[in-house]
Image (tube, helix red, strand yellow):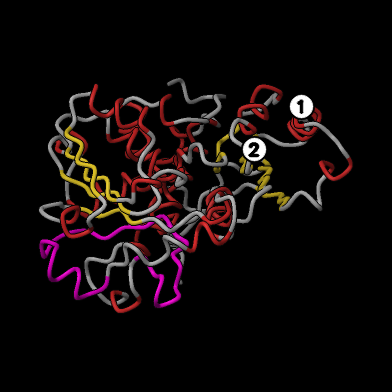
Amino acid sequence: MQFLGSHLLSTEQLTLGDIDTVFQTARLLEPVARGEKVTRLLEGAVLANLFFEPSTRTRISFGSAFSRLGGRVLDTTGFEFSSFAKGESIYDTSRVISGYVDVMVVRHPRLGAVKEFAEASGVPVINGGDGPGEHPTQALLDLYTLHKELGRELHQFDGIRIALVGDLKYGRAVKSLARLLSLFKGITFHLVAPDELQMPSALVQHLQACGHQVLQTSDLATGLHGVQAVYSTRIQEERFPSPEDADRFRGSYSINRAVFEQHCQPGTVLMHPLPRDNRSEHCELNNDLNSHPQLAIFRQTDNGIPVRMALFALVMGVQDQITASLQDPRWALRRR
């Protein structure tokens, strides 16, 4: 895709070349993401962080990424504090706010709403979560995490085996990751979920049409066998008809140390888009794994900063200035 001035709404926009561009840019920005260096690449630029669905980690991650590039962040959270509460349309909201800022990140509970923002906007819109649809930046940071944890460059991803576990019907992050992985060759997907929460059939057919192996099972032990990475997801209770419907599936696919040691290879990477349900009887990746070296979930969230910084740099067209900005003597090495 042409990043400069463009919206990022779906993983379907991305090629392997685009992903490589994002990763190369993210690697350059990692010292800034860690607070070791300072850059003012986006000084004077303003981000509208528009989150109309609950979020802590993703909203702050986007805000931190933009701030570390030297820009300013304006936040809106929830419907009750927005003009939607007065009956304003997405079209009007987007047209107005895009006149105030240089880029928008939008999260919305309704599928298709982020696309409506983009269609009305005069500035780039990045999808921060589109109902049960997509979460493209999460998929990029997840793939970046796999690249680092498995020690593989993108051209070495062909043939990996990965288990996608839990709520595969409503979980947007896991669907976006599956679409990104479909760009490679010979991936083996273990889709581990109850029948009611399995991956949508259209996406399964897409994976198969791309030449990948797909094993669908409701048995956790079968699904964990022989994989190099496990991507666990929580039950997306907010998308179920009622809490009682969600309760039927809680804790069904909890992985703890005993399960890991019995069914996973020693080097298997454990991932989760978070938040996980930390109640002991429900927790997808049990708290007894918190100190386990293969639990990558916190390294995964850390990776969101350089990846989102890279996307901002690319859509704002300043990626070619990164190296020079990091060598600018005005921005000396920081001490943490």
Viewer-closest of 143 and 33: 143
Residue 55, image x, y percentages: 59, 56
Q: Quadrant of residue 256?
A: bottom left
Rounded to the nearest angstrom, the CA distance separating label 1 from label 2 is 14 Å
Picture layout, residue 282 above or below residue 227: below
In this view, the residue in front, 14 or 67, is 14
Q: Amino acid at mark 2?
A: Met
Of 35 and 105, the residue lying toward us: 105
Q: Secondary structure at mark 2?
A: strand
Label 1, residues with CA under 10 Å away: few <14, some 14-19, many ≥20: some
264 in the magenta segment:
yes
Above or below, 310 against 94 in this view is: below
Residue 96 appears at what percent x and percent y?
81, 31
Residue located 14% across and 62% down the image: 264
Nearer the observer, disc 1 or disc 2? 1
Which amino acid type corresponds to the residue marked 1 in the rendered image?
Tyr
Picture disc at residue 294: none
Count of all numbered marks drawn on residues in the image: 2
Question: Which of disc 2 and disc 1 is earlier in sequence?
Answer: 1
In the picture of the structure, the residue carrying the numbered disc 2 is: 104
Position of 5 with respect to 168 (left or right) is right
According to the image, label 1 marks what residue? 91
Q: Are marks 1 and 2 in contact (CB under 8 Å)?
A: no
Q: Secondary structure at mark 1?
A: helix
**Badge 2 local density, few (<14 within 10 Å), some, or many (20+)?**
many
Residue 284 coordinates in the image, percent (x, y): 36, 65
Q: Vertically, is 129 above or below 265? A: above
Q: Main secondary structure of the magenta part?
A: loop
Which contiguous range is marked in magenta?
A: 256-284
Q: Which residue is painted at 10% across and 53% down in the image?
A: 226
Image quarter where the N terminus lies is: top left
Residue ID at (30%, 25%):
206
